[in-house]
Amino acid sequence: MKGVTMENKHTMSDLYQMQSMSLNDKIRMTKYRIKEWVSAYGEDGVYVSFSGGKDSTVLGHIIREVCGYKNIPFVFVDVPTQYPELKEFAKTFDNLVILKPKISFAEVCRKYGFPMFSKEISECIADSRKYIRILTDRQTDRQTDRHRDSVCLSNSRLDRNRQESRQGKQSIYRFEDGEYP
């Protein structure tokens, strides 16, 4: 990536702190990030992935009205599984590019299989793989210390609204050594 690096990874503590910021501070931080991207790629090198939902609508407003980048296009992907009102709403914006998928969802399912896993399940699988790696790395220690308990931490967000579920549901499962889920 030309001029922009992805080295700024935020911790959960950073994210909670940013959630508690004032709206003006959040907008100021967003403006700064937008200007970084536009500076790195130019106005003709960036676009807004626009779903017509509240998040992309607010981002689009900040880009066009607050930052003044009127020429950055909104890209809307027109799929038959979404509400028609979203497409009608998207059409009310200037400089909108509407993309249509080359193949239907049914064809995607036939060719690649039905997408069965939600984001929550994918996160759980990833967390489980990390846990298995830890167990594998510590296998020698576990064989020599039979009295130590094992702990499996799982974090899942039950609903998609971060405001309603700020920390998600945390579960702790205890297993005696050798008794894994």
Image (cartoon, helix red, strand yellow):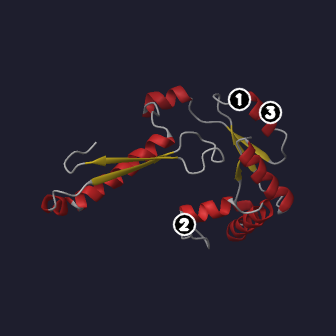
Which residue is disc 1 drawn over?
Answer: 83
Q: Residue furthest bottom?
A: 3
- Give the structural element (helix, strand or loop) at label 3: helix
Quadrant of the rendered image containing residue 14: bottom right
In the rendered structure, the answer to whether residue 104 lies left or right of residue 36 reads left
Where does residue 144 sit, x and y in percent of width and height? 13, 62
Quadrant of the drawing holding the C terminus: top left
Q: Which residue is depicted at the point 73% across and 66% down? A: 29
Image marks 3 and 2: residues in contact by CB distance under 8 Å: no
- Give the structural element (helix, strand or loop) at label 2: loop
Q: Nearer the viewer, residue 19 or 108?
A: 19
Q: Is residue 74 above or below residue 46?
A: above
User: Is any atom of residue 47 visible in this view?
Assistant: yes
Amino acid tagged 2: Lys
- Give the structural element (helix, strand or loop) at label 1: loop
The mark that comes first in sequence, 1 or 3, is 1
Amino acid tagged 3: Glu
Disc 3 from disc 2: Cα separation: 36 Å
